[in-house]
Image (tube, grey):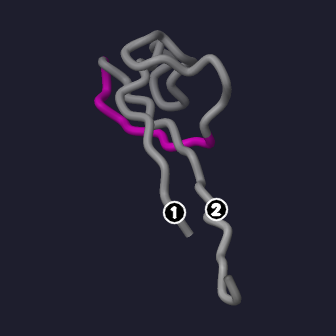
């Protein structure tokens, strides 16, 4: 093929705080599992839960 393109996929994880309902998007890292506890919320120090994992094709 003359015009072959290699797809670049950016992977993201969305975390949600159950206490203050704030969303935080960050880069996906190995070991991320849906509905698992993740990190501390930067607004209220509660533990966030992974709500969504997705990828975007460039």
Query: Is 20 above or below relative to 26?
Result: above
Query: Is 23 above or below relative to 30?
Result: below
* Residue 26 covered by magenta stretch: yes
The residue located at (67%, 24%) in the rendering is 30
Q: Are marks 1 and 2 in contact (CB under 8 Å)?
A: yes
Query: Is 7 above or below relative to 19?
Result: below
- Pick the front one: 39 or 6: 6
The residue wearing badge 1 is 57
Q: Furthest residue to the front?
A: 1
Q: Is residue 36 left or right of residue 58?
A: left
Q: Is residue 39 left or right of residue 52?
A: right
Which quadrant does the C terminus fall into? bottom right
Relative image position of residue 34 (x, y in whole percent): 40, 19
The residue located at (62%, 17%) in the rendering is 31
Which quadrant does the N terminus fall into? bottom right
The residue located at (37%, 29%) in the rendering is 16
Relative image position of residue 22 (x, y in whole percent): 36, 36
The residue wearing badge 2 is 8
Relative image position of residue 39 (x, y in whole percent): 57, 18
* Residue 7 covered by magenta stretch: no
Relative image position of residue 23 (x, y in whole percent): 39, 38
The residue located at (45%, 14%) in the rendering is 46
Where are the magenta residues, as a range?
19-27
Q: Determine crowd level at label 1: few under 14, some 14-19, many 20+ residues with C-alpha closer than 10 A.
A: few
Query: Is 52 above or below relative to 19?
Result: below
- Secondary-structure class at tag 2: loop
């Amino acid at each position: 093929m003359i015009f072959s393109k290699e797809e670049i996929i950016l992977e993201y994880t969305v975390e949600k705080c159950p206490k203050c309902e704030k969303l935080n998007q960050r880069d996906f890292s190995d070991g991320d599992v849906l509905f698992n506890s993740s990190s501390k919320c930067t607004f209220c120090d509660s533990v966030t839960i992974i709500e969504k994992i997705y990828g975007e094709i460039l």
